[in-house]
Image (cartoon, rainbow, N blue to C red):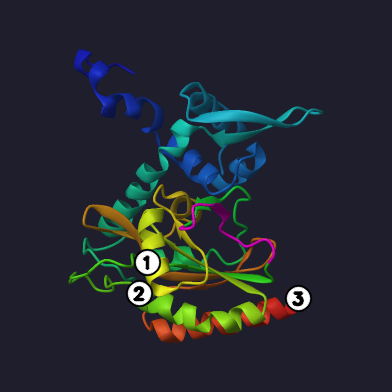
Amino acid sequence: MRMHNADAACGIAQAALIVADWWNVLVLREIARGHVRFDALAAELGLSRKVLTERLGRLVAGGVLRRSLYQRRPVRYEYLLTDSGLALLPLLVAMQDWGDRWVLGDGSLTATATEDGAEHARVHALTGTRLPADLLLPGADGTIRDVVAPEADATVLFTYPATGIPWDNPLPGAFGSTVENHLFRDAWPSFRASGIAVHGVSTQLPHEQAAFAHAESVPYPLLSDTHLRLAAALRLPTFRSAGQLRLKRSILVLDPQRTVRHALFPVGDITQAVEEARRLATALAARHG
């Protein structure tokens, strides 16, 4: 690729050398989703083995992927994100956010979604999807936690924009998220008695979540997706507010094998959604308990 002299000192130009290619971006998207083996990537992308081999080689050479041997006979590798590659996840989510709003949508900025839109279809297509095994997020208590509780008969994973800060935002759906945390908190004894774990996720920093959890006596873990690992892995809908990407409200019910069994999105009536999540998770836990 021919470059102007000024491009040598331009971060945009240098990043474009590595990621500004249709297939490179989609390869990174799929690896972020947990499809880290060659055959899985080829199947998801519908890409020839020759082209996929070339693109993986470029990304490894560019330092955003590394190869990890998982089988010796015949030799087989997994392709994993390096620290440099993980730093690209916010870029992927920002591209998705832009595409949802300006290409798949009408340009309106909203924290909600319509039931006939791409975001709705994408979240509901998660049903039957198994979450990556290495999907760990920092918790408000300072620990690194699996987004799926390994000891639970079911896990309710709910995403929300933010808590503990004043919201004066005219965007549809972009109001504070204290209410769902209060509802899950009040229903926590019922969840716990049924062997169900509850995890709340936002893009706030852990210390912000910790202050809210302490003030409101939240009994379940709040996890921080500030680096957008969960958002990228599940292609979750986001919206931008106060210069930050925030997760739109959704609720996923997962089994102990990390598979999404139910997806609730969009979440309009929060009270009804929390009760529906409790009903679905209780039925799932009874089958696995």
Judge the density around disc 3: few (<14), some (14-19), many (≥20) Cα neighbours within 10 Å: some
Mark 3 belongs to which amino acid?
Answer: Gly
Front: mark 1 or 2: 1
Residue at x-position 36% and y-position 25% = 17
Q: Which mark is residue 178?
A: 2
Residue 235: x and y in percent read 45, 55
| Contact, mark 1 vs mark 2 (Cβ under 8 Å) | yes
Q: Which residue is mark 3?
A: 289
Is tag 3's residue or tag 2's residue first in the polypeptide sequence?
A: 2
Mark 2 belongs to which amino acid?
Answer: Thr
Regarding mark 1 in the picture, which secondary structure is present there? Answer: helix
Residue 191: x and y in percent read 59, 79
Is residue 21 rendered to the left or right of residue 41? left
**Could you tell me how far apart the alpha carbons at marks 1 and 2 are, in whole angstroms?**
9 Å
Q: Which of the pair 155/141 is nearer the observer?
A: 141
Q: Quadrant of residue 245?
A: bottom left
Residue 121: x and y in percent read 45, 67
Regarding mark 2 in the picture, which secondary structure is present there? Answer: helix
